[in-house]
């Protein structure tokens, strides 16, 4: 009898700690919003909310893509650079090509993802080094093609991009599109064979391999999903800023990874959900916009995001495997 | 002669599994002691407890009359006990002398700068002390041949132990001769005798019984975590050792031999002349439908890498593998699965279960393509249904299909891995130590599962956890030794070979 | 390769094959160690033949001047790569130190003038950032690349905050002097960087700490069992890396006489490329100071050639990205079994 009661107590404890980390993202976003609202009620004004929702759209896309790479236990540091690159290309060529630039950028994203995935799986390189190199390459291409500065989309072509920022039922069209894509990602996560392999590779690559999963396909797919999302995020930035900005992506990679980590996705791979990423992104956007509203200098942003990342990663890290060597 | 170390009722438990129990060993000054037994009989565990790698869970040890226990290797070293590990623990990118004095550079240091010249001189002495004269102490370890590395490691352990204890040290050697040539083994033996003569004691594990009988004064025989005999040198002979190493046979009921199927004519897997460079050579065999083939051999016989080659984890150097009469290229476990081969791996925690995922995901992971629509869409409902079925059928104890698999006990987790293998519907299943770390109840269930699969027409290859298991399950046995197939047995349900027959061919 | 093995297999035992395998691994390792040196010689010869005055004393001095800051950074990075970790916060620490030192000596922004103490203080604070990175890495058990990525962002932010957007110009005459002095015809900056590099050589090759670094990268479990304090060693390695980054930041500030975080931008990548080119492995345990020197020299030469030939700086970065992927691919050890993440 005694054993039984002990067993139950143990179970109860586990459920508690686990549910905390599960709902952490929701708790944190409410907390952040509340704090800023108390300090300055303007934080929840219509204008401010509209603005935040608009800000959220591209970052949400980036973070949604990165979530899949983190599922595999890898990382994509190049997401921001890819976004810069497509932002520049969209801004530069939308007046010539028109709306067709969007599918073209998606194709570019696929190509980038395939290259990253190929290098990681074929040569067995760590993802962070491959994507670090990719960062330097795509950043360069962004700088080279833009000539180093921002360029505004000409006024007579603005109709091509304006619709995306316009509100539909109170929410920007851009965010509707992003939410649709997140829905698609959620479907992929829940209902496809490849996502099962992706999670298995992240949870235990060796066991996943021995069980006969196609680890190569899993890793390449994850990298590709991420790059496509990053490419689309770049397009959205061009639409939002109405110009091509070659350094737009520089801080984004870190923000996106911090957002995903806040959403409870482990950097070690194997667990998490795209839906939680939404709350993570909301938290990050609330923090950055909130700091703006309560007049904290914008220069603090890097510091705050860095600290958030460390805390979020720590909370979600697996603390049981003390014997595992971490490099 | 003084007693150095004595154990009383020493034992070790992992979870619910007793891996070592009631060990009473006495190590005296000047003795060379041999430990023998099958793989997993508990020899290595005992060594590790003495050397401070693992803690005992039962019983006590006394060292030179005082109670002793060590929780780190360092602590054991300080007490004059050193162990040479099976997998070498040298740092290959440092020089020989740096390795010998790693972590102990203090006496060569002045103003924080280490005097390598002085260290080399002392290292040379230490090497000569251990009988190794042909190694330059300033050479990097990675440039040395394997056998010399082994000798360096022995010299290192000797030096550490000597430094700490002048009262008689204990050196533990775990499978130290596996990579050495005949000549090198003789040098090592000479050193062992010299060390013993100086008032130290040497404990030696080997699978080669002739070696053990040649060098050891006293031989402890282990079986299933217990100690079955202590044999003095003058009483030792092969037959006696063999008979003590194998225990009573378990009943045929235990292995459900009544349901052993007779192999059909159809050959499912045909291995022809397959070699892997430096691991095994020219292995050939066929496995027929409904057959259970046991591969027996000691550690290092090449059976483990043969298993890895068959499941696609390692490549082979030459030879061909046919599945159902068609030549296949097993470039990865994924390719092997596509061709119809799946393995239940040996190391359950690292290779068997996908720890962070749920029971459900662990069950369907090898059948994704079959369960999906067009290889893409997979229905959550279908996965749930399949998993529920397996949990009920195999009586897996859990809170539900969504429970994380690493929360299950060893036996239940292994049942999930079996469910995965059967659900994948492959015709050829490789079982690498299928009952390692599993309690008795679950063992019997697993054995009857194996009979289920063969009745359905699968071919099964088993690398048994114990020799008894290998024979009990098998309808045919092949034996490997030193990378070659040395023989085989037919095992009809009523006409099984004895363990001694098989072990003679293995060792 | 496989043909040789099959031939050898015909008349040798499995044990002999195993020894043959080990011996051929040793041979391969030797080739791997000497390859960067051979490549360096080849590049130098080709450049000397095709480019006028490439091998002239003037250009050589110029080369060493160009590699002074990368060499300082590479000294610290070598240690980090040797333990198998990576430090992405290097750019941040370098930028922070450059910005801070400008504010602590005579400058156009404030009236603080601590002189040499300012330099010491900057180095201490910079090294402190490394200690924090290392501490968080070993205590919170978070992978080094992610913790240093986050720390890089934090320390860059602090660096920008110190001067709030408008960087300070240094007016202290000592900086001028260091930047323009030459000893034996070689700029003082080069001498300083060589001495920091020399210090790195001393620590890596002649101290117990240096050997502990090698041991951890090669076989962490074995290192721990010999009584090496692995956590402490790792923290010290990150501190050392931050120390060199901090020195590099100060040197860069000396050279430009302006303190802003952007002096750290685009420094990390060339340095990691150089160290890997020299033969260090990202998996740890392989590499050394001499190899790092060869790597940095080779990289600087390549860069120099690209400049002389007239390649756009943006394209140069692109080429760097490709070089590092090729170099890492060639140096990483892999087996069919491993899956990288």
Image (tube, rainbow, N blue to C red):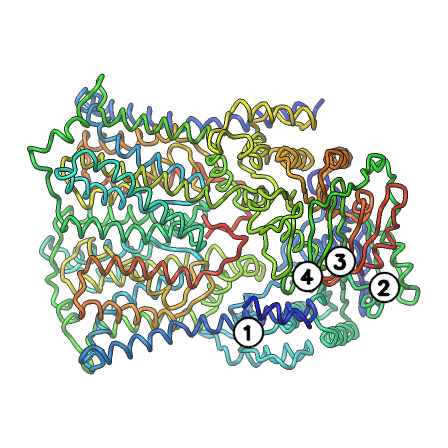
Asked if the residue at tag 3 contacts the one at tag 1, i.e. Cβ–Cβ closer than 8 Å, the answer is: no
Q: Quadrant of residue B253?
A: top right
User: Which residue is tagged 1?
Assistant: B143
For the residues carrying marks 3 and 2, which lies nearer the camera in this image?
3
| Apparent side of residue B32 relative to residue C246 in the rendered image (left or right) | right
- What residue does disc 4 label? B280
Q: Are the residues flagged by discs 3 and 4 from a single subunit? A: yes
Residue at the image point whose x is 62% and y is 51% from the top? B327
Residues at badges 4 and 1 in contact (C-beta under 8 Å)? no
Name the chain letter of the residue that bears numbered label 1.
B
* Residue pointed to by mark 3: B480
Question: Label for residue A290?
Answer: none
Q: Residues within 10 Å of mark 3 (few under 14, many from 20)?
A: many
Instruction: Indicate which disc, 3 or 2, sits on the residue closer to the N terminus.
Output: 2
CB-based contact (under 8 Å), mark 3 and mark 4: yes
Residue extending farthest to the top is A169
Output the chain of dot 3: B
Q: Nearer the viewer, residue B75 or B258?
A: B258
């Amino acid at each position: 009898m005694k054993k039984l009661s002990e067993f139950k107590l143990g179970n109860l404890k586990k459920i508690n700690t686990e549910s905390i980390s599960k709902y952490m993202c929701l708790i944190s976003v409410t907390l952040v919003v509340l704090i800023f609202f108390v300090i300055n009620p303007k934080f929840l004004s219509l204008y401010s909310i509209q603005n935040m929702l608009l800000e959220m759209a591209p970052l949400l896309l980036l973070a949604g893509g990165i979530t899949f790479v983190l599922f595999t236990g890898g990382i994509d540091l190049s997401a921001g650079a890819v976004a810069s690159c497509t932002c520049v290309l969209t801004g530069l060529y939308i007046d010539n090509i028109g709306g067709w630039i969007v599918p073209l950028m998606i194709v570019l994203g696929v190509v980038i993802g395939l290259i990253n995935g190929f290098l990681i799986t074929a040569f067995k390189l760590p993802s962070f080094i491959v994507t670090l190199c990719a960062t330097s390459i795509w950043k360069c291409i962004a700088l080279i093609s833009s000539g180093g500065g921002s360029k505004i989309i000409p006024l007579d072509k603005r109709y091509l991009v304006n619709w995306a920022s316009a509100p539909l039922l109170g929410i920007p069209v851009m965010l509707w599109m992003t939410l649709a894509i997140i829905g698609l990602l959620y479907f992929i996560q829940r209902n496809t064979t490849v996502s099962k392999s992706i999670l298995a590779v992240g949870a235990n690559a060796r066991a996943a391999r021995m069980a006969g999963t196609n680890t190569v396909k899993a890793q390449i797919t994850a990298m590709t999903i991420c790059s496509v999302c990053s490419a689309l995020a770049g397009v959205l930035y061009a639409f939002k800023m109405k110009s091509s900005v070659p350094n737009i992506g520089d801080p984004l990679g870190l923000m996106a990874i911090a957002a995903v980590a806040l959403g409870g996705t482990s950097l070690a791979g194997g667990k998490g959900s795209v839906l939680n990423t939404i709350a993570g992104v909301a938290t990050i956007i609330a923090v950055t916009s909130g700091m703006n509203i309560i007049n904290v200098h914008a220069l603090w942003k890097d510091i705050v995001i860095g600290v958030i990342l460390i805390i979020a990663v720590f909370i979600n890290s697996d603390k049981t495997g003390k014997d595992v060597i971490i490099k | 002669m003084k007693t150095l170390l004595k154990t009383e009722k020493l034992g070790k438990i992992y979870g619910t599994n007793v891996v070592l129990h009631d060990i009473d060993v006495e190590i005296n000054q000047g003795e060379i002691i041999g430990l023998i037994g099958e793989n997993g009989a508990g020899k290595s565990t005992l060594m590790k407890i003495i050397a401070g790698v693992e803690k005992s869970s039962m019983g006590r040890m006394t060292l030179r009359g005082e109670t002793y226990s060590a929780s780190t290797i360092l602590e054991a070293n300080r007490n004059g006990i050193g162990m040479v590990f099976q997998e070498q623990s040298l740092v290959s990118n440092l020089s020989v002398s740096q390795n010998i004095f790693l972590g102990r550079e203090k006496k060569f240091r002045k103003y924080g700068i280490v005097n390598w010249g002085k260290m080399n001189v002392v290292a040379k002495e230490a090497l000569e002390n251990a009988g190794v004269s042909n190694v330059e102490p300033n050479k990097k370890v990675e440039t040395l041949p394997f056998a010399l590395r082994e000798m360096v490691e022995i010299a290192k352990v000797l030096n550490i132990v000597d430094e700490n204890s002048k009262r008689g040290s204990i050196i533990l050697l775990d499978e130290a001769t596996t990579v050495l040539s005949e000549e090198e083994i003789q040098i090592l033996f000479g050193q062992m005798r010299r060390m013993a003569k100086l008032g130290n004691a040497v404990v030696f594990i080997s699978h080669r019984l002739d070696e053990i009988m040649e060098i050891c004064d006293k031989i402890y025989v282990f079986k299933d975590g217990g100690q079955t005999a202590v044999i003095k040198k003058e009483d030792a002979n092969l037959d006696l050792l063999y008979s003590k190493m194998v225990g009573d046979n378990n009943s045929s009921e235990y292995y459900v031999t009544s349901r052993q199927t007779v192999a059909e004519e159809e050959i499912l897997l045909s291995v022809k002349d397959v070699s892997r460079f430096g691991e095994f050579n020219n292995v050939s065999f066929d496995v027929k439908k409904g057959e259970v083939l046991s591969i027996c051999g000691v550690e290092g016989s090449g059976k483990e890498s043969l298993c890895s080659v068959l499941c696609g984890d390692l490549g082979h150097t030459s030879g061909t593998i046919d599945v159902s009469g068609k030549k296949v290229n097993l470039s990865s476990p994924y390719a092997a699965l596509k061709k119809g081969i799946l393995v239940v791996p040996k190391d359950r925690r690292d290779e068997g279960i996908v720890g962070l995922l749920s029971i459900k995901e662990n069950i369907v992971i090898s059948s994704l393509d079959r369960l999906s629509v067009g290889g893409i869409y997979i229905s959550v409902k279908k996965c749930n249904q399949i998993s529920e079925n397996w949990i009920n059928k195999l009586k897996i104890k859990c809170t539900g299909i969504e429970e994380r698999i690493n929360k299950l006990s060893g036996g239940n987790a292994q049942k999930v891995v079996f469910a995965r293998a059967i659900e994948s519907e492959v015709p050829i299943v490789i079982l690498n130590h299928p009952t390692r770390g599993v309690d008795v109840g679950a063992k019997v269930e697993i054995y009857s599962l194996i009979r289920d699969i063969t009745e359905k027409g699968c071919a099964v290859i088993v690398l048994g956890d114990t020799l008894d298991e290998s024979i009990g399950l098998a309808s045919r046995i092949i034996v490997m030794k030193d990378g070659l197939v040395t023989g085989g047995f037919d095992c009809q349900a009523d006409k099984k070979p004895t363990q001694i027959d098989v072990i003679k061919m293995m060792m | 390769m496989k043909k040789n093995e099959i031939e050898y297999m015909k008349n040798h035992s499995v044990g002999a094959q195993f020894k043959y395998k080990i011996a051929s691994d040793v041979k391969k390792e030797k080739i791997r160690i000497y390859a960067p040196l051979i490549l360096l010689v080849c590049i130098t010869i080709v450049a000397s033949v095709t480019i006028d005055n490439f091998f002239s004393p003037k250009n050589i001095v110029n080369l060493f001047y160009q590699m002074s800051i990368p060499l300082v950074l590479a000294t610290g990075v070598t240690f980090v790569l040797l333990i198998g970790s990576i430090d992405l916060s290097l750019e941040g620490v370098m930028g922070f130190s450059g910005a801070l030192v400008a504010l602590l000596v005579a400058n156009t922004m404030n009236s603080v003038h601590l002189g040499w103490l300012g330099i010491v203080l900057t180095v201490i604070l910079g090294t402190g950032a490394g200690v924090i990175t290392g501490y968080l890495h070993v205590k919170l058990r978070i992978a080094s690349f992610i913790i240093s990525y986050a720390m890089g962002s934090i320390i860059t932010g602090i660096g920008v905050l110190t001067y709030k957007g408008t960087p300070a110009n240094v007016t202290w005459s000592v900086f001028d002097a260091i930047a323009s002095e030459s000893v034996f015809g070689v700029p003082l900056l080069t001498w300083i960087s060589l001495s920091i590099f020399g210090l790195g050589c001393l620590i890596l090759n002649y101290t117990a700490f240096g050997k502990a670094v090698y041991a951890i990268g090669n076989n962490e479990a074995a290192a721990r069992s010999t009584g090496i304090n692995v956590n402490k060693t790792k923290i010290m390695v990150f501190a050392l890396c931050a120390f060199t980054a901090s020195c590099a930041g100060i040197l860069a500030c000396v050279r430009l006489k302006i303190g802003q975080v952007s002096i750290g931008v685009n420094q990390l990548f060339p340095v990691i490329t150089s160290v890997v080119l020299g033969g260090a492995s990202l998996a740890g345990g392989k590499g050394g100071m001499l190899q790092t020197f060869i790597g940095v020299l080779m990289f600087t030469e390549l860069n120099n050639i690209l400049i002389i030939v007239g390649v756009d700086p943006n394209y140069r970065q692109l080429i760097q990205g490709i070089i590092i992927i090729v170099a890492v691919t060639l140096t990483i050890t892999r087996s069919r079994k491993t899956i990288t993440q």
